[in-house]
Image (spheres, helix red, strand yellow):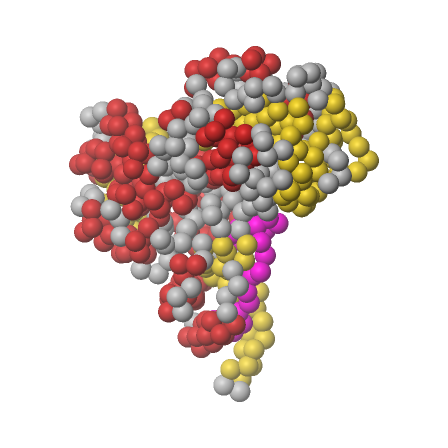
Amino acid sequence: MKNNGVMILDFGSQYTKLIARRIREENIYSEIFKHNISIDEVERLNPAAIILSGGPSSVFSNNALRIDPEILKYNKPILGICYGLQLLIHSYGGNVEEKNSGEYGLSKLNVDSSHDIFSNVPNEINTWMSHMDQVTKIPLNWRIVARSSNEIIAAVSNHDSSRIGLQFHPEVIHSEYGKVILRNFLINIANCSTGWNANNYVKDQILNIKNEVGNDKIITGVSGGVDSTVAAALIHKAVGNQSTAVLIDHGLMRKNEAKTCVSALKKGLDVNIHSFDESDIFLSKLEGIKDPEEKRKIIGNQFIKSFEKISKKFGDIDFLAQGTLYPDVIESGFGEGGKSQTIKSHHNVGGLPKDMNFKLIEPLRDLFKDEVRKVGVELGLPSELVQRHPFPGPGLGVRIIGRITKERIETLQEADKIFIDILHEDKLYNDIWQAFAVLIPIKTVGVMGDKRTYENLLALRAVTSVDGMTADWFKIPESTLAKVSNKIVNNVKNVNRVVYDITSKPPGTIEWE
């Protein structure tokens, strides 16, 4: 466990990732593990504290998710949130019962401010609830430290505060003083170290990469996005000329993206980087393919084949490095206690061929997007590159709905560039987490130059987010939207109508495919 961090045991909560984020915001390392991790593994990792997440189960049901009972005897503080609270109560001899009514959304709490968990918290606060089952009896030598306005038990503690349970979700932004409550547990109760930051992470990874690679050679796959660019810079920092960065232009990049990325790495950081145009083979593989899952798999597989072919130009290559992030791991079905759905099968985590000839190195695998940006700054990458909006591995392949052709790619590239350029002009770009255009396989009737047109529909998408796990649509001013729409329909061939996507995540995803 890095830097004496916090272990989060996941029971399937939609908020587990938020717990990890909130902890890291305190410069404390956190990591999500399966709920059924063994006590032996816990002792080996030696966390400073353990947090039990929420989840959809009922602790009294036959198929309820449990933990190794020996973990409850572990001599480190444990915080249970929602289901985690109920599991603690049930395990220590209290009662949890199903009731006819629950608490959902905002709920007013009366708290005992004398308890360390509520230090510097008012006696009355609003918190985010999401539960049906309720604690009806606490274990012996435990005490109630908060109740909801409905007189439902909302927080409990054992006699020495080494075991604390919260029925509400402090990790959710709607919970007043949620960050304060988590900080109280992490620092005042668990005495966690707050030394985890971008600088320390860079130092640790450089050492890890050197030890793993030794004298072997490594290729870093660069896509033009922030993640792979930062990964390439970090690998170069660690092993210098043993590394070669390879940018494969699959023909699905943003306009001029390949040139921008190569220039930043080569001229700015002296990274050994080479660009290869493989667009013809990618487009031939994608010809006639409409299904998004099939497109992702084709692009992911061809990337590896191209890397394997190109690597032979540089001698014996043992390692492939890539910019996998923690959300990639989670959304590829490898996180959340093994209970998560595979949302992004195109990701390097879940979409790589099984017969690769490389050993993988993923130096950013433990990080969220904003943390990667901090690492990029620490490495000396230019801000215009570090602050670029995220770009998916399959590139424009997941932004062209339906068939991918060279003509449709060019149409989308031109429209997307206009959109992004105007966001920069109107000083909105840095307020947006991700913005892009989507080409939709629907044609609409229009009138241009007194003539009837029947051309493509284009959608614009812009969202705010912290880590990409949740997102809300960005309220672009009408004047900016009008400017973008007018310029696109007047300058981009084959587009006569522009719409704006106002869907949050959830229920939608950020990308359309």
Residue 447 location in percent, x, y?
55, 81
Q: Quadrant of the N terminus?
A: top left
**Taking the image as drawn, is residue 442 in sight?**
yes
Magenta residue span: 494-513
Toward the front, the furthest residue is 114
**Magenta span includes 82:** no
- Res 402 seen here: no
State the residue at coordinates (55%, 31%): 117
Residue 82: x %, y % from top left: 64, 32
How many marks the image carries: the answer is 0
Q: Residue at x 30, y 30 (%)?
A: 204
- Residue at 52% in and 15% down: 74
504 in the magenta segment: yes
- Which residue is at a point 33% across and 38% down the rendered structure image? 198
> Which is nearer the eye, 340 or 367?
367
User: Magenta stretch: dominant SS?
Assistant: loop
Q: Quadrant of residue 99?
A: top right
**211 shown above or below 197:** above
Place of residue 49 in the rendered image (x, y in percent of width and height, measured from the top left): 49, 24
> What residue occupies the far right of the structure in this picture?
100
Image position of 445 (left or right of 433): right
Whole-percent x, y for residue 382 in the image? 27, 52
Question: Residue 371 vs residue 154: left or right?
Answer: left
State whether residue 84 is above or below residue 440.
above
Q: Is residue 45 left or right of residue 506?
A: left
